[in-house]
Amino acid sequence: MNTAIDIALTVNGETVARRVEARTHLIDFLRLDLGLMGSHAGCEHGVCGACTLRVDGVIVRGCLVLAASLDGAVVETIEGVSDSGEIRDLQDAFVARNAAQCGFCTPGMLMAAADLLAHARKPKRDEIREAISGNYCRCTGYQAIVDAVEAVAKARVFRG
């Protein structure tokens, strides 16, 4: 029995058409079929946040979404938002504050932080913690990450 499905979607601004197995998760499709290795597969249960991506403007866990369900969708990965310059200030702040130690959680953290800053102009520290709470980090203890996101939020407000 053939369980492959034809899909066409936009990934980081480029149209992609592939035949995928019905059970293939988005994170596996991106990493294995498209070679986009920036987002990581961690727990594969939607708990750790390492596979956080944007689908049609909403952040999702790539390990919980089936690629076959995304025909016609717009997917943005860490590579896409990084290459576009959308998160350059967040990346710089993470580096400046040593908020990216081993780097495994960093793509998911950046996607969650970018989503927060797109929806909250001046988030408080507890709002930042809440926004990144679905992303596990074993290295930094979160303080440096919260500091980095807070600094970018303040800088963006100052720039207008």
Image (cartoon, rainbow, N blue to C red):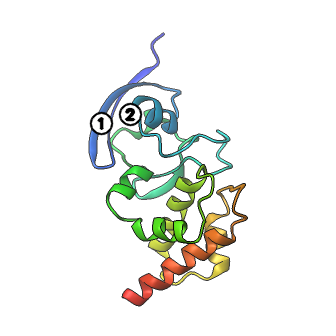
Give the Cα distance between marks 2 and 1: 9 Å
* Amino acid type, mark 1: Val
Identify the residue at horizontal 48%, vertical 73% (top origin).
Answer: 117
Q: Quadrant where the C terminus lies? A: bottom left
Residue located beneath label 2 in the image: 34
Drawn side of residue 123 relative to residue 77, left or right: right
Residue situated in front as seen by the camera: 117 or 139:
139
Residue 44: image location, x then y, percent? 64, 38
Residue 13 falls left or right of residue 34: left
Mark 1, residues whose alpha carbon is within 10 Å: few (<14), some, or many (≥20)? some
- For marks 2 and 1, give the one nearer the viewer: 2
State the residue at coordinates (51%, 39%): 27
Q: Amino acid at mark 2?
A: Leu
Element assignment for label 2: loop
**66 and 148: which is toward the camera:** 148
Decide which of tag 2 and tag 1 comes sooner along the chain. 1
Where residue 56 appears, as percent x and y from the top left, is 39, 54
Local packing at callout 2 (Cα closer than 10 Å; few below 14, some 14-19, many 20+) is few
Q: Would you say the residues marked 2 and 1 are in contact, meaning their CB atoms lie under 8 Å apart?
A: yes
Q: Dot 1: what SS?
A: strand
Disc ID at residue 16: 1
Query: Is 70 placed above or below 144 here?
Result: above
